[in-house]
Amino acid sequence: MNRPALKRSAKIGYRLALLCLLALGYALPSSAQEVELCSSMQPCSVARPVVIGTDTTLSVVWRGRAFFDRIGDVSSDVGYFTLGDPASSEPLGMVRRPLMERISGSADGQPTAFSFSETLTVPAAISTQAAAQGARELSYVRPFSVNGIPVTGVQTLRLADPAAPLPNTARSLPENSEVTASGLILRRLALRFDDGAPVASVSRDEALHAEAIIHYDRAGLLEAVWEVATPATTRGQPVFRRLDNVREYLGAGQQSSLRSPRLPTDQPGLYLLRLHLVHPTLEQNGTREPNDIVLRYQVSSRSTHEAQWVPHLNGARAVAATLGADTEFTWPAIATTHAYQLEFYAQPPEPDVADERPGPDRVPNRFTREPTTGLVLKSNTRSTRLSSAVLHRLEPGTTYSWRVVAVDASGRVLAASPLQTLRTEEE
């Protein structure tokens, strides 16, 4: 074959290869299209603005849709704040709090819509820095993994000038009502559990949250305290202790909801929960009403954890002398595993069990503290290196305890490797 013919053949081969690559490129997004997050059909939302120069706590709602095989995982290691295009802007600050939600799939194999809330605090320094650059909005960005598919969620946070006139200030005050410094007037408070019921009965260690529905006029700062009375005192005169502080700006609107922190369920017996209003208090017919709305929930002695000690996951190891970007973690397969969790602890964790250890071939199901960071990996994964989000949470010159955990489709722990330690390099 002469040289021109060879050149023509090479060109034809190149074009065919390019067409194949383009076809593959157009085919790949089809799987990504199975996942929606913060889309026009599944919009994410933040109801309240960020008050410039004030630490502002918001309830951020993430919404999406995806195909899930029985139970799927939606996880994110880190979030960050930016101005302008999230893809090209430098982060103003990081939120180093992992999120993980387990979503039950549809029985008919159709896409499942999901939503969950994140309690987000925007530091005063972030909003001040954004305002100094002339911004009226702030972007809150989280890279998520939905069934192992990477997808990014972006929330738009409005910035509010604390010196600007408050929304709804045109409303006239009811006769005999006191004008508060914030202008906020609370009309009604209702408490309920996540399922909408006024009472709840759960197993020991089961996750439980409550919600406060607040009806109000005007706008301003709400200060309150979630308080709980445990079974140690509810048999007689209840003694309430602080569970969490609430400090949230309520803007334009007439209704808002506050989600409680996770409620204690570690002891069997009766618990009482209330939201104690510090400022302002309820207004009814021109007089202040006491905050005596209380929720009751009963915790049974049966634990939701099937086993406190689980079998060894033997053979998990780290192929490196130090902990870093090149460290490879490997482990063997465990039958019926739905996902693997790689967990890191900055402090040596203590087993969350009261019984004596049943034998040397078993390890704790869980510990008294949550992991500092980690990864959730698909069931066919046998090795991994750390993502940049995980590496960002590791401090230099620090020794971390780590382990690999195998869980089934219901989230039950099947096996876990014994704790091992690795130290990050000094800066």
Image (cartoon, helix red, strand yellow):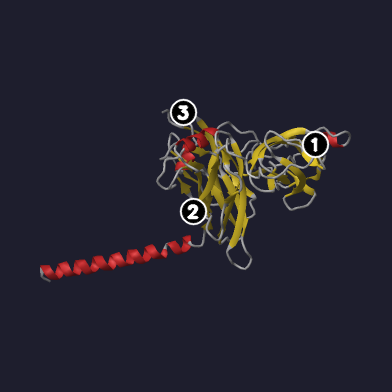
> Along the line of sight, which residue is nearer the eye, 173 or 325?
173
> Along the line of sight, which residue is nearer the eye, 301 or 278?
278
Alpha carbon separation for disc pair 1 and 2 = 41 Å
Residue drawn at (61%, 57%), measured in percent from left and top?
Answer: 114
Q: Is residue 343 visible from the viewing direction of this image?
A: no
Alpha carbon separation for disc pair 2 and 3 = 32 Å
**Mark sitting on residue 230:** 1
Where on the picture, by quarter, is residue 12?
Answer: bottom left
Q: In terms of sequence position, does the residue under pointer 1 or pointer 2 come before the other?
A: 2
Crowd rating for badge 2 (residues with CA inside 10 Å; few <14, some 14–19, many 20+) = some
Q: Is residue 302 left or right of residue 400?
A: right
Q: Is residue 415 visible from the viewing direction of this image?
A: yes
Q: Position of residue 59 (x, y in %)?
A: 62, 45
Kind of element beneath mark 2: strand
Residue of label 2: 151
> Along the line of sight, which residue is nearer the eye, 318 or 221?
221
CB contact under 8 Å: marks 2 and 3: no
Q: Position of residue 420 (x, y in %)?
A: 53, 36
Residue drawn at (16%, 67%), measured in percent from left and top?
Answer: 7
Q: Is residue 173 left or right of residue 118?
A: right
CB contact under 8 Å: marks 1 and 2: no
Kind of element beneath mark 3: loop
Q: In terms of sequence position, does the residue under pointer 1 or pointer 3 come before the other?
A: 1
**Mark sitting on residue 397:** 3
Q: Position of residue 185 (x, y in %)?
A: 73, 41
Where on the picture, by quarter, is residue 283?
Answer: top right
Disc 1 marks a residue whose amino acid type is Thr
